[in-house]
Image (cartoon, grey):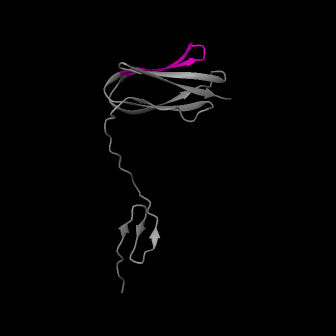
Amino acid sequence: MITKTHQIWDGANWVNDYRDSYCYTPTGIVKTESAPDNFELNNNYPNPFNPTTTIRFLIPQRSQVTIKVFDILGNEVAALLDETKESGSYSLEFNGKSLVCGIYIYRLAAGNVTESRKMLLLK
């Protein structure tokens, strides 16, 4: 005779009637997308990078978005994005293979907000 054991979630693991805990691995993740509440520019990852890095940002409302990369002297070395984006979370990849090693600044402008971050290219 097979008896069904009762399972409960204790906040970290599934636990059965015998108090044996075991790990539960989900087979699918459902993501609910909601509009961000505020503007956010994240640090690039990885940083330092060679030769590619990912830049992530959030915009709370439909805006004209530009992302540009500058060298340490303020010279523009790349224009990564210049288009209208809906509210949401975005990421883009920057490839610095044609640039020399050093510190670069990436600047995001969306609506009336502008924010900048430093990144380091190592080869």
Image x and y of residue 66, in percent: 43, 20
> Which residue is at a point 40% across and 73% down the rendered structure image?
16
Q: Is residue 63 above or below residue 22?
A: above
Q: Quadrant of residue 63?
A: top left
- Magenta range: 64-83
Q: Position of residue 59 (x, y in %)?
A: 36, 29
Q: Is residue 122 above or below residue 76?
A: below
Left or right of 93 in this view: 62: left
**Residue sticking out furthest to the right:** 123
Nearest to the observer: residue 37 or residue 75: 37
The N terminus lies in quadrant: bottom left
Residue occupying image coordinates x 42% and y 78%: 18
Q: Magenta part mainly helix, strand or loop?
A: strand
User: Which residue is most to the bottom?
Assistant: 1
Left or right, 5 with respect to 73, comes to: left
Residue 82 % position (x, y) = 42, 19
